[in-house]
Image: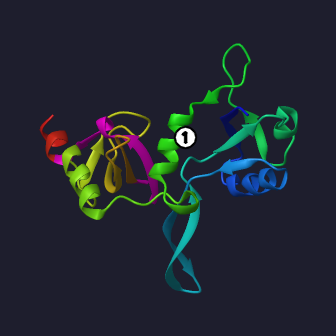
Amino acid sequence: MSTRWVSVCTFEGREFDAEFELSRAGFRVFAPWQMDDEEVFRNGRMRRRSKKVARFPGYIFVELLEGHSLYRLQRTGGVISVARRQDGAVLPIADKVMDLLREACTRDGYWPPEAPDVAAERAALCGYRIGEVVVLKDGPFAGFPGIVERIDAGRQIMVVSVTIFGRSTSVECPLSWASDTDTAMAG
């Protein structure tokens, strides 16, 4: 019996609905997730809550077994499309890749967060710190100063809070788009 895993595109934010529908239709589904903390202002008080979010927004992985219908997969609720090659054939994901992905996740697809010391070490390697003031030197907000909110050194991006017309806006940008204020003032 041959099996193959495929990547399925879903509506972003609705990955778990698609996972449920595909499971109900008899498919084996793998949707890695993580817990994300957010601050919510409600009834005059700031509250912190955790919610389950997809690790790969807009995508889940489905195992196609012998006898599974690709037509049925594509017509299941929440599915937009299946990843394909340029010639139109379904693009399978190697079993080794799926094994590594499942191994990286703990039980039930939960993707554990990085240990704080590892995250801090990666952030230190990129040269920026959370709370530091930087000036964006490229992109649509070039020349705007902002405060570093979050750094993902693995993906080489940061989230910078920029004030535009009196409103704070979070901008996700590559690390190369920012320079510290001392460098920006000298140049």
Q: Is 172 colored magenta in this rendering?
A: yes
Of residues 162 and 175, which is closer to you in this image? 175
Number of dots carrying numbers: 1
Q: Is any atom of residue 165 visible in this view? A: no
Can residue 150 be seen here? yes
**Residue pointed to by mark 1:** 98
Q: 109 and 34: which one is in front?
A: 109
Overall secondary structure of the magenta section = strand
Q: Is residue 66 left or right of residue 107?
A: right
Q: Report the residue at 49% width, 81% height from top.
A: 46
Up the image or down, 18 lies above or below 141; here it is below
Q: Quadrant of the N terminus?
A: top right
Q: Is residue 181 left or right of residue 47?
A: left
**Quadrant of the rendered structure where residue 98 is?**
top right
**Image-quadrant location for residue 44:** bottom right
Residue 54 lies, in percent from the top left, at: 58, 54
Residue 77, image x, y percentages:
84, 48
Q: Position of residue 80 (x, y in %)?
A: 77, 39
Q: Is residue 101 above or below residue 129?
A: above
The quadrant in which residue 81 appears is top right
In the foreground, 141 or 85: 85
Tell me: residue 69, above or below residue 20.
Answer: above
In the rendered structure, which segment of residues is drawn in magenta? 162-181
The residue sitting at 76% across, 57% down in the picture is 20
- Between residue 4 and residue 160, name the one nearer to us: 4
Residue most extreme to the front: 1
The residue at 45%/50% (across/down) is 104
Three-letter residue code for mark 1: Met
Q: Report the quarter where the C terminus lies.
A: top left
Q: Quick one: SS at disc 1?
A: helix
Relative image position of residue 173 (x, y in whole percent): 40, 41
